[in-house]
Image (spheres, rainbow, N blue to C red):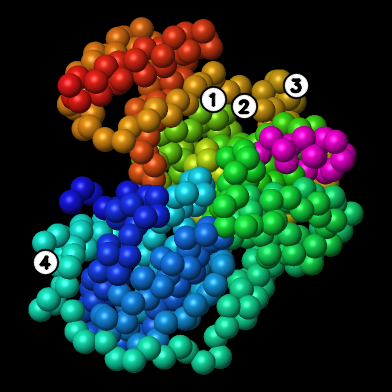
Amino acid sequence: MEKLFGTDGVRGIYGRAPLTPAWIMPLGQVTAALFRRKNSGGGGEVFVGRDTRRSGPDIVRALRRGFERAGCGKIVDAGVISTPGLAYLLARYKPLFGAMVSASHNPPAFNGIKFFDSNGLKLAPEMEREIEGRLRGEAAASAAGFLPAAPAWKPRGGLKPSGLQRDYLDFLKSTFPAHLDLGGMRIVVDCGHGAAWRFAPRIFEELGARVRKMGCRPNGRNINSGCGALAPESMRREVVRGKFDCGLSLDGDGDRVIFSDEKGHLMDGDILLTIAGVFLKQRRVLTSNKLVMTVMSNSGIIEFLEGRGIAVAQVPVGDRNVYAGLEAEGAVLGGESSGHIIFRQFANSGDGTLTALQVLSMLKSMGVPMSRLLGRLSAVERPGAAARRAAVPRLFPHILKNVDAEKKIPLEDCPALRRALKRAQAEFRGRGRVVVRYSGTEPLLRILVEGPTRRQIRRISGELEGAFREDMIRRTT
């Protein structure tokens, strides 16, 4: 069996291993039994949520059968809810554990399963490895001798999906400053036909904004399709066409957000983190004046932040790594360029809607158009002509290539790619960088090249892609 868990749970195309009922049921069974064993065998409750993919209900049913076989007698269905929404409910109600059925930003054919503990935190790598070990051999078929018999399933009374979702919405509203509202603002909200399609527009409306909804007609097959955080162009165009104050795009499970200002300039997670970091530093609530970002963050952003007295700790890609970095550094703010941002004073995981609320509250506090927000913050931080000339980061040119990789050959076994990497690093001489890694959620190799000129980075990224394809051909012939 290949490694089951990636950087964000189990991912794949439904109907192909490991996302078949024959795999999903024992996965649920083994996971539930491990949680029961670690909690002295108690039955406990399991909370389950999903996004809008067509395969979601089938996967939930297979998981539930596995949970029942492991002796979990109370299963609470949270319905269609965002991943951070389920994490919040777990932290509030403290069940045995939770499961989210979602492939986040991936295309509609994909789906996935993420497990959380009773604090709303994703599983530690050690527990993922233990689950994988249990699923090898006989455990994958019957888990004989390990799993207890299951009692009859009984849903918990009083907890309905609509009530749980209202709990989450009320929590989100509580994070918005009580002395502010969104009255007078016109906002485009693109939910990517995903899990946030019901509650995200509603919360902005309840705070006083006029909302133009996009991506709010899920049919099970259109999640993330030409919309949402990975395809914000239609949102950006609508902002400009309709002369809106700003727009935002969420991904399929609602944990990422990308903004557009009123002029149609897109603002990714790096820019949003910069805005929030400078804003919180000015209010003296940015602990240790430090942010946590990933190795994919633009060097120009890091240089800009450090020039304003904000240190940056860089960690590997993945929200679990960002959270671990926040804990290690004692920081309160961190995230990824993808728009997955953690405001640790409110939550333990990234939440696109919560991030949007925080950014909009900063916008209202400053009283300027969104296109001028970062410049205004910078001018306040360091007044004077010199500061105004450097009011926004100078982003280094970069290219991110995604290369198909059905078989994820260990990179140390790719000699052509290693030689190309060595040549690139020698050519940059410290004035550029290359990050090559496999996606933890899709069968892709990601190649990030950042350097002084676009012509140079295009050439180098092409050479790296060609070298990797050469290694792939060599391994298959």
- Horizontally, is 447 left or right of 389 in the view? left
Magenta stretch encompasses residue 240: yes
Under tag 3, what secondary structure?
helix
Of label 3 and label 1, which has the lower sequence position? 1
| Of the image marks 3 and 4, the number of the one nearer the N terminus | 4
Q: Is residue 3 left or right of residue 450?
A: left
Disc 2 or disc 3, which is closer to the eye? Answer: 2
Nearer to me, 214 or 270 = 214
Disc 1 to disc 2, C-alpha distance: 6 Å
Q: Earlier in the sequence, mark 1 or mark 4?
A: 4
Label 2 crowd (10 A; few <14 / some 14-19 / many >=20): some
- Specify few, some or many for label 3: CA neighbours under 10 Å numbering under 14, 14-19, or 20 or more: few
Q: Which residue is mark 1?
A: 300
- Mark 4 or mark 2: name the one nearer the start of the chain: 4
Label of residue 138 in the image: 4
Where residue 304 appears, as percent x and y from the top left, is: 57, 28
Judge whether residue 138 is colored magenta.
Answer: no
Q: Which residue is mark 2?
A: 393
Distance of mark 3 from mark 1, alpha carbons?
A: 20 Å
Give the overall secondary structure of the magenta segment. helix
Q: Is residue 220 above or below residue 308?
A: below
Magenta span: 232-246
Residue at 64%, 57% in the rendered image: 218
State the SS at label 2.
loop
Is 381 situated left or right of 88 in this image? right
Query: Sequence order check: which comes first, mark 1 or mark 2?
Result: 1
Mark 4 crowd level (few <14, some 14–19, many ≥20, 10 Å Cα): few
Q: Secondary structure at mark 1?
A: helix
What residue is disc 3 on?
Answer: 385
Residue occupying the far front of the picture: 15
